[in-house]
Image (cartoon, coloured by chain):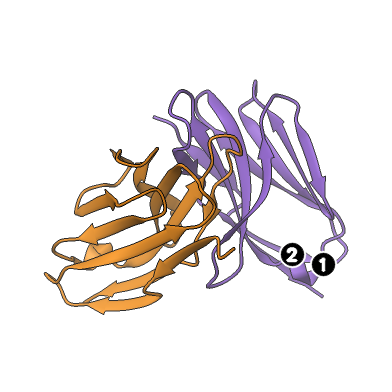
């Protein structure tokens, strides 16, 4: 059974600091996704990682994928208040394209 | 483009009542999905449809039925609502090439 685990589940940061969110998954997967969700809102796609060693960056967020370790990281550089949200990673099952399994989510709060 | 739309936005039901959640997308996507989101559990797939006329079960299908009415529309029906179905329901769609899923605004359902 494919399981996806994120840590930490809650993260309180000060503005200007760096931190990393980790996403571990239990079995082989085709693709890994990162989503952002603001309170009471829908999910917004941030990154799609397709292969081992993939790295993508958008502003203060950088995501990477290590398929051998079954690990993805979302690194936050010099956090700002606008990054406060819940971040989800998700993977899809090999040969069952499109059926996403989500992690529990990491609730990030960036304080001045 | 409206993207993915869902109706209603909010709904309160009594135990045993039935209702249908509607979802439509205008992106010409083949695949559509229904998820439920509960606190601390991320999103869980209820049903999905890889193409018009086909549907398949996800992780938590019990108590739900779906209809892929045409390429644009994918509905989720609760035949006899139970308090355990209190949740936020998200519809999503994806194309065969882009992999990433685009989410609707969600329906907040409370069953009393």
Q: Colour of chain A?
A: purple
Question: Residue B51 occupies which quadrant of the picture?
Answer: top left
- Who's the residue at 39% across and 29% down the image? A1
Q: Is residue B28 visible?
A: yes
User: Which labelled disc corresponds to residue B52?
Assistant: none
Circles 1 and 2, Cβ within 8 Å, touching? The answer is: yes
Q: Please, which chain is the residue tagged with disc 1 on?
A: A
| Label 2 sits on residue | A83
Q: Please, which chain is the residue tagged with disc 2 on?
A: A
Residue placed most toward the observer, A46 or B27: B27
| Label 1 sits on residue | A80
Answer with left or right where residue B32 lies relative to residue A81: left
Q: Position of residue B53 (x, y in %)?
A: 29, 40
- Relative to A37, residue A49 above or below: above
- Relative to A112, residue A25 above or below: above
Q: Position of residue B70 (x, y in %)?
A: 34, 50
Residue placed most toward the observer, A89 or B7: B7
Q: Position of residue A71 (x, y in %)?
A: 64, 32
Q: Colour of chain B?
A: orange
Look at the numbered disc 2 and give the secondary structure of its residue.
helix
- Who's the residue at 61% across and 39% down the image? B98
- Who's the residue at 31% across and 77% down the image? B11
């Amino acid at each position: 059974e494919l399981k996806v685990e994120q840590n930490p589940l809650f993260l309180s940061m000060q503005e200007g600091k760096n931190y990393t969110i980790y996403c571990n998954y239990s079995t082989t997967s085709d693709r890994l996704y990162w989503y952002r969700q603001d309170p009471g809102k829908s999910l917004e796609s941030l990154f799609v990682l397709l292969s081992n060693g993939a790295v993508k960056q958008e502003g203060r967020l950088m995501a990477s994928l290590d398929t051998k370790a079954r690990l993805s990281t979302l690194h936050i550089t010099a956090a700002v208040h606008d990054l406060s949200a819940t971040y989800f990673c998700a993977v899809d099952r090999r040969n069952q394209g499109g059926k996403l399994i989500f992690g529990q989510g990491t609730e990030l709060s960036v304080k001045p | 483009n409206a993207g993915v739309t869902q109706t209603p936005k909010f709904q309160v039901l009594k135990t045993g009542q039935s209702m249908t959640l509607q979802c439509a997308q205008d992106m010409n996507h083949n695949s559509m999905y229904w998820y439920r989101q509960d606190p601390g559990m991320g999103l869980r797939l209820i049903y999905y449809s890889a193409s018009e006329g086909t549907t398949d079960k996800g992780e938590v299908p019990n108590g739900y039925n779906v209809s892929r009415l045409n390429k644009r529309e994918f509905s989720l029906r609760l035949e006899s609502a139970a308090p355990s179905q209190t949740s936020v329901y998200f519809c999503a769609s994806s194309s065969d090439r882009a992999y990433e899923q685009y989410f609707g605004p969600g329906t907040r359902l409370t069953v009393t």
